[in-house]
Amino acid sequence: MRIRDREQDDMSEINLIPLIDVILCLIIFFVITTTFASRNVLRLQLPRADGEAPQQKDKPLAVLVNADGRYFVEDRESLRNDVETLKRTITEVAGNDRSRPVLLRADARTQHQAVVTAYEALGQLGFRQVMIATAPQPKEGVAK
């Protein structure tokens, strides 16, 4: 009769491959579903102007107009380019606070009508502090 060694049967082995698969799937899920800042999504070429930015107490409401004339309020895109849809999007994001300053960031290549439409929507909603974002003028003798 053969006597078996019981110590060998008690040694359990941990298989790490399923754990690694699950962790890899979680990492891929979180990388794909991560939201990124709207600044990185939209590449705007701002018009140039001299002057300094005023100091603001409140964080201004950001309204962006890209080169194609599409509107973005903070991180939400307005589905259509008409005044009523833009007003609805601004109301959803800003709520009832009409004293909040607004920073209008329009691409330098945007048609003027798109900027006027944004001003019209903001004016009809009662926003009175509207600022336009510009890029500083390049210094003389410095390449762009």
Image (cartoon, grey):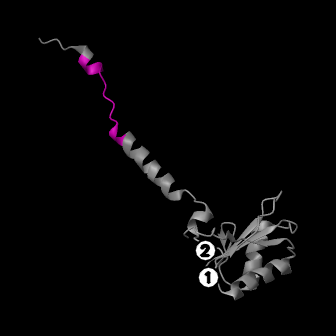
The disc label shown at residue 109, or none:
1
Residue drawn at the location 84% of the way across and 65% of the way down: 100
Residue 27 picture location, percent across and down: 46, 49
Local SS, label 2 = loop
Identify residue for label 2. Answer: 45
The residue located at (61%, 72%) in the rendering is: 44
Residue 74 image-quadrant placement = bottom right
Is residue 33 magenta-colored?
A: no
Q: Which residue is depicted at the point 73% across and 79% down?
A: 86
Q: Above or below — where is 58 with respect to 113?
A: above
Q: Which mark is residue 74?
A: none
Picture coordinates of residue 118 (x, y %)? 75, 80
- The quarter in which the N terminus is drawn is top left
Q: Which span of residues is magenta-colored?
A: 8-18
Among numbered discs 2 and 1, the one appearing first in the sequence: 2
Mark 1 lies on a secondary structure that is: loop
The reply to whether discs 2 and 1 touch (Cβ–Cβ < 8 Å) is yes
Three-letter residue code for mark 1: Arg
Residue 31 in the figure: left or right of residue 73: left
- How much space separates mark 2 and mark 1, taking CA atoms? 7 Å
User: Is 31 placed above or below 22 here?
Assistant: below
In the rendering, at what x and y percent does residue 103 appear? 75, 69
